[in-house]
Amino acid sequence: MRSLFALMCWMMWVLVAPAQAQDDYLIGTGDVLSVQVYGEPTLSAEYPVGERGMMAFPLIGSVPVVGLNADQVAASLLERLSPDYLVHANVTVRVAQFGSQPVQVLGAVGKPGVYYLRGPTSLLHLLGEAGGVTGDGVSEIRVTRAATGREERVPYEALLSTNSGVLQLQPGDVVFVPEALISVMGEVGKPGEIDWREGMTLSQGIASAGGLTEAGASRRVMVLRDEEQLRINLRAVLAGEVEDMLLQPGDRVFVKRAIF
């Protein structure tokens, strides 16, 4: 199922990528522009956008380009080159290298790292570019918004079946795909879902949830796994009398209240 989803993400990326027109892309610092001036090979080259948002161009000097799209830059160059330098100039501009709108993709994907937006980009598209989701127990995708610092959570299974996958990303966003989640409820300091990791034990899971409260019954810990209900004596585990239990993705841990 997971490998199939990764393949579908990649296929979606391949299909969508050519449709992302540069008309919608606003140029920023760190981009590299390819300028073609027909009939003028000495002027046709790639030009980086500097830190001040300017592009140094022969004959006319620094040209402001940040916040413009490729067609607008071409029009600006044409205006500056004609008629003093070139008569009937024909100028085209495209983005040769995208480097101004970074988004981090972390966690259980094929190729985690920093990716650069090339225009309007959906969550599903970027996951495809990053090699798709690879974890076996992934239940959600988390997107931390650069503008607000708020975290948005998208259910994993809803990415293809609903419109969740079209969530539009913005520069500076961080996409995190947790390997899997478990829930720890009841008498613990911070009940709720926590990230599962390979080799996580029951005692480690409870510790990650803030540990037992004063009312927590260390001898009355339940682990719900599919249709099973496993009762664990955590006190005996911590005393080294019994082996600590390995948790699995999707496990639900419940710490009961002690009876005084």
Image (tube, helix red, strand yellow):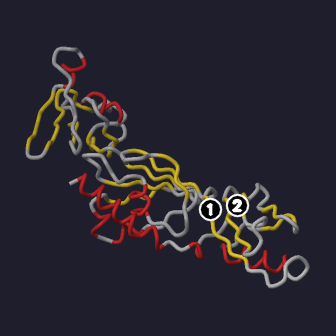
Q: Is residue 146 above or below residue 214?
A: below
Q: Residue at x 85, y 78 (%)?
A: 86
Q: Residue at x 52, y 70 (%)?
A: 120
How crowded is the residue under tag 1: few (<14 C-alpha within 10 Å), some, or many (20+)?
Answer: some
Residue that label 2 marks: 46
Residue that label 1 marks: 96
Mark 1: amino acid: Ala
Q: Is residue 38 above or below residue 199?
A: below
Picture coordinates of residue 170, whole percent (x, y): 55, 62
How crowded is the residue under tag 2: few (<14 C-alpha within 10 Å), some, or many (20+)?
Answer: some
Q: Which mark is residue 250?
A: none
- Quadrant in the picture for residue 39: bottom right
Picture coordinates of residue 223, whole percent (x, y): 17, 37
Q: Residue at x 46, y 50 (%)?
A: 105
At numbered mark 1, what does the secondary structure look like: helix, strand or loop? Answer: strand
Q: Front-most of 173 and 206?
A: 173
Q: Is residue 147 left or right of residue 193?
A: right
Picture coordinates of residue 56, whole percent (x, y): 81, 61
Kindly indicate whether the residue at mark 2 contacts the one at mark 1 (C-beta within 8 angstroms): yes
Q: Is residue 220 left or right of residue 140?
A: left
Among the two numbered marks 1 and 2 on one chain, the one whose residue lies closer to the N terminus: 2
Mark 2: amino acid: Glu
Classify the position of the N terminus by image quarter. Answer: bottom left
Picture coordinates of residue 131, whole percent (x, y): 38, 52
At numbered mark 2, what does the secondary structure look like: helix, strand or loop? Answer: strand
Q: Front-most of 160 and 236?
A: 160
